[in-house]
Image (spheres, grey):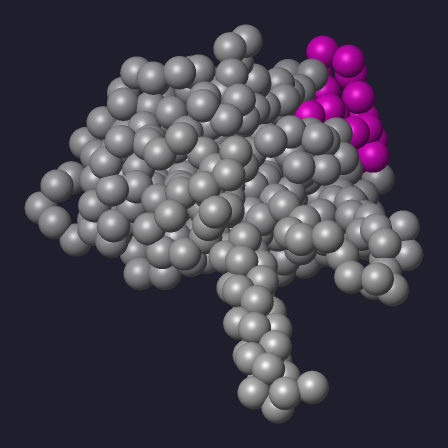
Amino acid sequence: MDPIFVVLIVLAIVIVGGGVAFVATSRDRGAPGEVGAGGDGGSTALAEPPGDTLVEETPPEALEAPEGAPTPEDRAPTEELVRPSFRERLAKARSTFSGYVTSVLSRSEISEESYEELEEALILADVGIGPTQELLDSVRSTVKERKLTTNAELIEVLRAEMKLRLEAPTELVRSEESPTIWLFVGVNGVGKTTTIGKVGRRLADEGASVVMAAGDTFRAAAAEQLGTWADRCGAELVRGAEGGDPSSVIFDAVEAAAARSADVVLADTAGRLHTKTNLMDELAKVRRVADKGSGSVTEVLLVLDATTGQNGLNQARQFAEATDVTGVVLTKLDGSAKGGIVFAIRSELGLPVKLVGLGETAADLVDFDADEFVEALVAVD
């Protein structure tokens, strides 16, 4: 065979092979400026939303698997998320109570010292002075009415009263018309973006389709962090230019979700601004704009760091006034958190604690359970 002809055949093979490789790479992640995962403009791309917002879609299985490659059935199963127990993760918080509870139980009869020790324990646990007084006044009344005499009975009345005061619906509400929109608010550093990622993972496990909106355009790397979570749970990410209008990003995300028939939009918001704009004014605007398009906002979840104690309660007051907060997500409840802030939030603000973070993994974000929480907190180790 003519050597020149052989060379031409080899070159043709190289060019064709390179073209296939390029197509595969483009399908893995859309090139900058492209909408959706498919760089080939196929039907998997979302309709481009208004503005300069970029919609990134977590890629589907790209090209047909080569011969001999493992099939989905051959691959290791996804690790099942194991829910932690409150008692296990609240060991340090419980230690604040356990010494006082032990001391109260050591006495044969209920006395004024019993109430004083419980008062000190509750205040040290971040319940707050006002809620502590109201709680113990109610406990005193019940003890007197039932003519109770033992400290074991006193502790049981305390537990029952705390559970009663913490009772509230914890289910995250979905809208009748898709997409459902959940806004996450809170200051920087409380774990807001991570919480969105964990909620997205939960929704994905339930079979819901999710769009994440990177509305915190003022924090460096916020969109990248949210994008990592979107990749992990198969969600789509909508982001805008750094320092851009957060409301525009979230509006575009809602419209993109509607075009895609996605179930839920999880929207991150700024925790601090680099301009003279007041944060609360900006969040109020975000809330108004999010409700203008398709679907509706059914949850405005305030993310608080449990380790901040009464400072977190002050944050909750400010955010609740600006954004009509529907519930609280309490992060970092394990570790050094004292736990009583849960009771203070419910008692003073009337806000239900809907989710709590008991650790770092996706499984550690769990529904708040008043009975389990109180039993784990007011106990003797």
- The image quarter containing residue 250 is top left
Q: Residue at x 62, y 90 (%)?
A: 3
Closer to the camera in the image, 230 or 301:
230
> Is 148 covered by the magenta stretch?
yes
> Is 217 covered by the magenta stretch?
no
Image location (x, y in percent) of residue 185: 38, 38
- The image quarter containing residue 122 is top right
The mark total stands at 0
Q: Residue at x 63, y 57 (%)?
A: 360
Q: Residue at x 25, y 50 (%)?
A: 241
Q: Is residue 201 visible?
A: yes
In this view, the residue farthest toward the top is 176
43 left or right of 208?
left
Q: Residue at x 56, y 41 (%)?
A: 235
Image location (x, y in percent) of residue 148: 80, 21
Overall secondary structure of the magenta stretch? helix
Up/down of 167 relative to 91, above or below: above
Q: Is residue 332 visible?
A: no
